[in-house]
Image (tube, grey):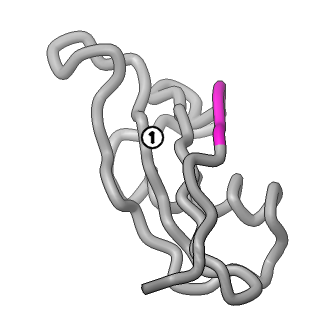
Amino acid sequence: MNPVRTEKEVESVAKKATEALYGDNIKDFKIRTLLPFPTEQNREAWDAQVTFLLGGLQYTVDLLINEKDGQITNTRLIDKMVPL
């Protein structure tokens, strides 16, 4: 896989992973927060929190994406709610 260095590259990898987990019917996909991991000076990965709509519900998912190869090393569902 290719390195992931910019927000646009992170968004592309995160969307692919989210579609693999939740299917192709997601809407309004966006990055809510993007942080370097573990620190800004020693970044090895990106901690991306994304939101999207699926089946009338808003999901918030956290993804840890390796910078050097774009692999997802951890993912977790943070919240699932009726959108405001």
Residue farthest along the top direction in this orientation = 42
Q: Quadrant of residue 79?
A: bottom right
Position of the N terminus, as image quadrant, is: top right
- Is 27 on the left or on the right of 21, as rendered? left
Viewer-closest of 53 and 19:
53
Tag 1: amino acid = Val
Q: Position of residue 20 (x, y in %)?
A: 81, 58
Q: Residue at x 65, y 39 (%)?
A: 76
Viewer-closest of 1 and 60:
60
- Mark 1 lies on a secondary structure that is loop
Q: Is the residue marked by circle 1 packed among few (<14), some (14-19), or many (20+) residues within 10 Å?
A: many
Q: Residue at x 52, y 27 (%)?
A: 66
Residue farthest along the left direction in this orientation = 41
Viewer-closest of 37 and 3:
37
Work out whether 5 lies above or below 8.
Answer: above
Q: Which residues are magenta?
A: 72-76
Position of the C terminus, as image quadrant, is: bottom left
Q: Residue at x 54, y 59 (%)?
A: 60
- Is 71 on the left or on the right of 5, as rendered? right
Q: Main secondary structure of the magenta part?
A: strand
Residue under label 1? 4
